[in-house]
């Protein structure tokens, strides 16, 4: 049982497990309300509420103790994020948008349901059927190859060590194991609306709504004490959102001369914000033209680069220019930002 000091009775007050759970729930709500991202405040609070409702009928003592321990660990993460720990805040945003946790499985579920089943490699033996093929998942694997995963498809040897043909049962097992491993490592594609919102937040075209709660109450040895939560400045917020956006892709169905296909791409905003090494806490400064350092203005003048590198840099610059012009036409670039981006 947990105890708290009583200033009136001058003796410790013993709390039962249900009382500890209610106290923990209030503390979690309080810390969640201090997050600077309104989407994180909404989703983390809903997740906490659903989790408490699901576990409120647990009667096993050991299970209750474990659940309270997990809740205090989450409370510690939220507290450290609000105090200025940027990596804890990045972890909270990963849970919010789906790089980790329950939302990741929710975003991957529609893609896994659309997989076309494969025929068994050995007739009348269903367990030898390799994982079904899906062009959308394969495009997701190819986009994150070299970043999240090594290869999208496993390498199957033609012969076994004995020189005989490789067993088909092992082929199916290797493919299933490789697919499961890749699904654990990749990040799911974000919905277009959330992907665009992160892009605008990274560029500074959109500002997060300030949390209503400015102070958080903490228990000390002499009683409750109010302490102001850390206020992340706009530059720190953009850096944390940029770290979050780097992990996600946007899945699109494009019509090409060779036919329609699925394409997963990273944001052109990340391709344009190429910065030199510096303090990870802050954005780099701007040059005399008013553009961030590292933006490719004229890729053809990059001396010492091969033709392939110049072409790749030119394509990145063109993608960002197209994205920026589209946002200007939609009226999503604030007037005070036009002098920096033309």
Image: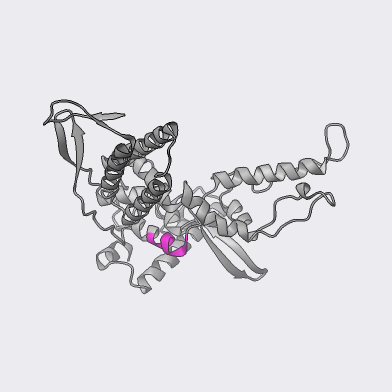
- Looking at the image, how many numbered discs can be counted on the residues? 0
Relative side of 133 to 341, left or right: right
Residue 327 lies, in percent from the top left, at: 38, 68
Whole-percent x, y for residue 300 in the image: 48, 58
The residue lying toward the viewer, choosing from 312 and 111, is 111
Q: Quadrant of residue 27?
A: top left
Tell which residue pokes out farthest to the left in this image.
8
Tell me: 294 left or right of 233.
Answer: right
Quarter of the picture holding the N terminus: top left
Q: Is residue 136 visible?
A: no
Say if the magenta span includes residue 45.
no
Magenta residue span:
191-197
State the residue at coordinates (84%, 49%): 122
Residue 222 horizontal/vertical position (percent): 14, 29
From the viewer's side, name the closer residue of 237 and 173: 173
Classify residue 316 as left or right of residue 124: left
Comparing 137 with 47, the one in front is: 47
Q: Is residue 3 above or below residue 312?
A: above
The coloring applied to the image is one colour
In the drawing, does residue 79 fall left or right of residue 170? left
Q: Residue at x 21, y 43 (%)?
A: 229
At horizontal 60% and vertical 63% (from top left) the residue drawn is 262
Rendered residue at 43%/31% (across/down): 62
Image quadrant holding the C terminus, namely bottom left
Q: Is residue 195 magenta?
A: yes
Q: Position of residue 29 (x, y in %)?
A: 29, 47
Above or below, comparing residue 238 to residue 73 in the picture: below
From where the camera sits, is residue 251 visible? yes
Outermost residue on the right side: it is 164
**Viewer-nearest residue: 188 or 25:** 25
């Amino acid at each position: 049982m947990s105890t708290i000091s009583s200033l009136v009775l001058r003796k410790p007050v013993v709390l039962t497990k249900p009382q500890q759970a209610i106290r923990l729930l209030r503390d979690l709500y309080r810390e969640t309300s201090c997050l600077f991202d309104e989407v994180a405040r909404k989703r983390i609070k809903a997740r906490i509420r659903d989790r408490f409702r699901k576990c409120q009928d647990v009667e096993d003592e050991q299970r209750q103790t474990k659940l309270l321990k997990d809740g205090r660990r989450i409370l510690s993460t939220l507290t450290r994020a609000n105090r200025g720990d940027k990596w804890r805040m990045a972890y909270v945003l990963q849970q919010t948008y789906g790089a980790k946790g329950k939302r990741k499985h929710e975003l991957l579920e529609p893609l896994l349901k659309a997989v076309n089943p494969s025929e068994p490699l050995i007739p009348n033996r269903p367990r030898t059927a390799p994982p079904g093929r899906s062009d959308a998942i394969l495009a997701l694997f190819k986009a994150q190859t070299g970043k999240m995963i090594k290869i999208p498809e496993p390498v199957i040897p033609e012969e076994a060590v004995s020189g005989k043909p490789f067993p088909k049962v092992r082929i199916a097992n290797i493919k299933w194991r490789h697919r499961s491993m890749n699904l654990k490592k990749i990040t799911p594609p974000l919905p277009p609306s959330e992907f665009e919102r992160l892009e605008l937040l990274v560029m500074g075209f959109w500002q997060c709504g300030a949390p209503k709660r400015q102070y958080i109450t903490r228990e000390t040895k002499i009683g409750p004490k109010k302490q102001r939560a850390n206020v992340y400045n706009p530059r720190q917020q953009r850096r944390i959102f940029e770290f979050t956006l780097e992990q996600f892709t946007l899945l699109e169905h494009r019509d090409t001369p060779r036919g329609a296909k699925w394409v997963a791409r990273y944001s052109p905003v990340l391709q344009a914000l190429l910065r030199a090494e510096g303090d990870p806490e802050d954005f780099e400064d701007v040059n005399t033209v008013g553009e961030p350092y590292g933006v490719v203005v004229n890729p053809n003048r990059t001396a010492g680069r091969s033709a392939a590198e110049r072409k790749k840099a030119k394509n990145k610059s063109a993608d960002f220019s197209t994205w920026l012009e589209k946002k200007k036409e939609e009226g999503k670039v604030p007037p005070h930002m036009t002098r920096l981006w033309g």
